[in-house]
Image (cartoon, rainbow, N blue to C red):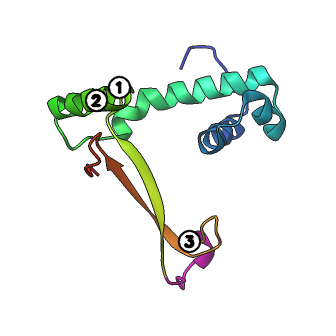
Amino acid sequence: MRAGVRIPYLPRSVLLVLWYFATRESNRELAVRFGMTDSTVHESVDIVMTALSKRLHHLVKFSISVIEIRAVAYNFHKRNHYPGIVGAIDGSPIRIQKPKDEPDVWIDRKGIHSINLTAVVDALGRFTS
């Protein structure tokens, strides 16, 4: 983080960025939703994304080699014209029985008890994670 830069509304900024990831709303829509100015929304997204990108290498570990990562990126670029992509990620809820402890924690957006299955595939549709 830059010296002397104050993070505006830190908890709201993190929530704002998570909401942005989930909805891709415009800065103006985010400003209204979170009670911020457009410039504060822009600054908040910039600060949180910069902080995340600096720490990303500690959070994401690839189980394939650098050579394999380059091959996957090449294939994505060749097939779809997307440069620098090393995997496509998606998820699906898996229905579970209602847990005895904290059942509300396991309710998804459709109101059913579930856990998320998340998968990553390469450019050829092969599962890598």
Q: Residue at x 52, y 82 (%)?
A: 99
Task: State the residue position of label 1.
Answer: 84
Q: Is residue 19 left or right of residue 61?
A: right
Snapshot quadrant of residue 65: top left
Task: State the residue position of label 2.
Answer: 73
Relative to residue 103, is residue 68 depicted above or below?
above
- Determine crowd level at label 1: few under 14, some 14-19, many 20+ residues with C-alpha closer than 10 A: some
Number of numbered labels in the structure image: 3
In this picture, which residue range is highlighted in magenta? Answer: 97-105
Relative to residue 98, is residue 74 depicted above or below?
above
Q: Is residue 53 magenta?
A: no
Q: Secondary structure at mark 2?
A: helix
Snapshot quadrant of residue 58: top left
Q: Is residue 98 magenta?
A: yes
Which is more N-terminal, label 3 or label 1? 1
Q: Are the residues at dot 2 and dot 1 in contact (C-beta closer than 8 Å)?
A: yes
Q: Position of residue 33 (x, y in %)?
A: 81, 40
Q: Position of residue 93 (x, y in %)?
A: 49, 66
Snapshot quadrant of residue 16: top right
**Viewer-side residue, 114 vs 102:** 114
Q: Nearer the viewer, mark 3 or mark 2?
A: 2
Q: Which mark is residue 128?
A: none
Task: State the residue position of label 3.
Answer: 106
Q: Nearer the viewer, mark 1 or mark 3?
A: 1
